[in-house]
Image (tube, helix red, strand yellow):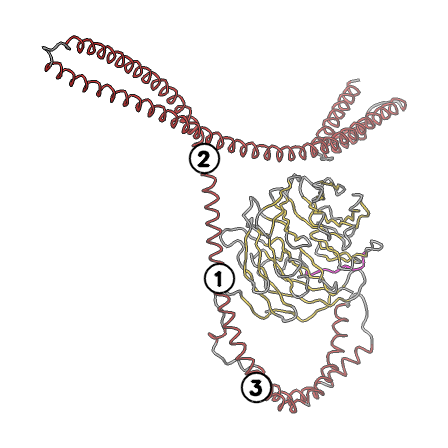
Amino acid sequence: MNNRRLLEVSEYVCLGLSISGTILATVTQQVVYAVIPLNLSMAFNLVNRHKFNYSQSQLQLQIDQLQTNLQNITEEFYQITKTMNTSNQRLEQIAAWRQQLSQIIDQTIETTINDRLGEIETYKQQISQAVDQKFQALAQKLNREFNGLNQQLRTVNNRLQELDSSLVNLNSTVEKDEYLNNISELKAELSQINQEIHFVNSRFAEVEISIKNGYQSTQQQLAELRDNQQNQTLEFTQIYQKIEVVNSRFEQIDNSTHKLQQIILEQSQEISEIKEKQKNESSKINDILDAINHRLTKLDGLTELDSLFTALIQPLQIDNKSNLLTNQITAEPSEEVGEIFTINNLDSLSDSLDESFDSLTELNTWLNPLQGANPSNLQKSDNYPEKSEIPNIIPTTSILDDKTGKLVTVGTLKGHQSKVLSVAFSPNGRFLASGSDDKIIKLWDLAKEEHLTLKGHGESSGSRGINSLAFSPDSRILASGSDDKTIKLWDVSIGIEIFTFPEQEERIYAISFNPSGKILASGSKDKTVKIWSLETGKETYSFKGHTDDVLCVAFSPDGKLLASGAGGNDKTIKILQLAENKVKTLTGHSDWFGGITSLAFSPDGKILMSGSQDNTIKLWNVETSQEITTLLGHSDTICAVAYSPNGQILASASKDKMVKLWSVANGEEISSVKCNDSVIYSIAFSPDGKMLAAGNGDTTITLFPVA
């Protein structure tokens, strides 16, 4: 009985652990927390069941109860999962509403501040006008009063003078009969003078009262004006501070512009000097070519040399293929005969080489007259971008296509000191740009076998890595985004930096030009997608709909859509409809390792391709936002995807060190090649679709021919 009781208690304990694990798995989205307790419960019952004397019916009943409990737990788990998905959608909608509300609030605050400043300025002008008018009215009134008083005082003085003269006359006529009449007139005049003096005193009192009242009202108005002036002073102080910040920024821009102008002037002077040197050298070369025409007759033996080289190379190529496929195919007898024939011809080939060596040496002297020149005359200034012949173009080599079993001839570019994170072809097909973790950008001219080295990222900080490159549609400008939190623009023709956008808060992972070439989009570690104007050099739009690092951005061919993908905890693709200011969200990559690492639109803009950390590639219908198909074949994270210019082939690169080509028509894998046993971080098709470039973790760039 104790054993049975112990078994029941253990079953309840395991059931409680299973329920707790299910709840924990739902919250953390980790299924392992639910699976482990459930497996422990089942294992415990299977191990200990035979130790107790249970009847068949009791065993079956408990098994049925356990199955019922499992079904209930599974249903609850799926219901909770659905609830979590609904909650996530609502949270995304709330975040979008919050962003829109923030924009509306910012616009409202800015409009209100501008309106308030306008009202304050108008009110200030009105108060100034009213005070001026009131002071003018008071001054005019006081002037009139004082003028009236002056006139009355003049009248009184005149009357007093007349009185004095009358008194004098009175003294002279004191004994005359008219004495009494003068006395009466004098009294009348004195009474009039007293009345006028009383009137003047009353007027002075009224003027004094009006002046006191006006002074008090003026003091009140001045106090109000002082308060308003203090408030306005605070507001204007804040505005002046902002203006000072803007002015300092403008000063920095002016300084940068001045430096850029100086650099351009120096470059133009150097270019003019180089052009003069080229003219002199061209005249020398013309003379050399005239001399070469006379010496070409000595090279008749080269025809025989060429045929012998052909006879030598063909069997060596056969031997190379047989060595590469030692474990797969057996060498043919004809190849062995070809090798023996080649060895027998070595003597005759050596004789022809000896005969032609003297002619080749003399020709080399004529073709390279500058080899003996002073090296100091051939060096470029420090400010001019480094330009040299491609140092290490390895001759084409053959590697095995794991899908078809055929050999693929590839070329390799070397020049970087660290892994190559980004590659991009110019739209005119002349240049291939590469960005590396060594902070360097290489601009390869494949036709001339030359390259420019562009330096400027990360020089003032310890940050590294050119994560993304993009050419403008006219191939004149190259944009670069880096771990140093900046986006730079470079002039492709002369290889100098022409502009740096304002530094962002976090590193830049991706950039993309729109078809017009006037707008540049960027994705950053700060979880935002920003749009920049090349005409103003300023940010024009910021999208904050992602919840984790934005790893990739891409414009549609018509420029109406901007797609962005995020990694980590986001795992979604956002498609911004720029004209309507609407957002579509695409979900479908794994909930566990579904970060979006790369995006590419088809040439017609109807399909969007996405590469993910869940090792898959998905194709999406842009109009309906529905998944079309999933391409499976890689065994590790997808680092980059690309559409061929004709839209018939897809390319993908992965951390599994493979580059794969896929057919758009049927979604089948048509080629799979391993590059140098290193991770491939980026890929790009040439504009004619005949070449695919891949940036590798071993510091090289591999060039694949595309059939």
Along the viewing direction, whichever of 64 and 96 lies nearer the viewer: 96
| Cα separation between marks 3 and 2 | 74 Å
Is disc 2 placed on a helix, strand or loop?
helix
Residue where numbered disc 3 is placed = 287
Above or below 108: residue 249? below
| Cα separation between marks 3 and 1 | 36 Å
Viewport quadrant of the C terminus? bottom right
Residue where numbered disc 1 is placed = 263
Residue 594 visible to an observer of this rendering: no
Label 3 amino acid? Asp
Q: Mainly helix, strand or loop, the magenta region?
A: strand
Viewport quadrant of the N terminus? top right
Task: Specify start and end residues of the magenta stretch as a single range.
Answer: 669-676
**Which mark is on residue 336?**
none
Residue where numbered disc 2 is placed = 236
Q: Residue furthest right?
A: 57
Mark 1 or 2: in front is 2
Task: Name which of mark 3 and mark 2 comes first in the sequence.
Answer: 2
